[in-house]
Amino acid sequence: MKLKLDLHDIYNRGQDIDAALTDIMHEAVRTKAKVVEIIPGKGSGALKKHVIRFLDQEEIKKLYHRVEKDSKNWGRVFVHFRWK
């Protein structure tokens, strides 16, 4: 299962971005998704940095296996999960 979160609609609302990221991460854990695709968009890169900082938080980092920045489209981030 793959989940997708597009942040284009809420790019300028910090609290909404954090809430959406938290929700998608918990949804991934609940449904045991293999991958979450987060689309911050290309823009200036500030939103992507915000997403990476969010994913680097200790309590969030415990939830996933690894983060992959798309080499073909730098406006996407993949969060991979490993379930036993």
Image: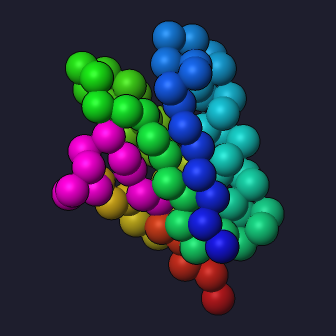
- Which residue: 29% across, 31% down? 42
Give the main secondary structure, helix, strand or loop, of the magenta stretch: loop
In-image side of 79 versus 30 (left or right): left
* Image coordinates for residue 10, horizontal then vertical, percent: 58, 19
Residue extending farthest right: 30
**Relative to 31, is 45 above or below?**
above
Front one among 9 and 14:
9
**Relative to 77, is 54 above or below?**
above
Residue extending farthest top: 12
- Which residue: 64% across, 51% down? 25
- Which residue: 60% across, 38% down? 21
Residue extending farthest bottom: 84
Magenta stretch: includes residue 73: yes
Q: Quadrant of the C terminus?
A: bottom right
Q: How many marks?
A: 0
**Relative to 65, is 70 above or below?**
above
**Relative to 12, is 24 above or below?**
below
* Image coordinates for residue 70, horizontal then vertical, percent: 28, 56
Front one among 64 and 8:
8
Question: Which residues make up the magenta segment?
Answer: 70-79
Front one among 26 and 13:
13
Magenta stretch: includes residue 35: no
* Image coordinates for residue 52, horizontal then vertical, percent: 37, 39
- Which residue: 50% across, 26% down? 8
Q: Quadrant of the N terminus?
A: bottom right
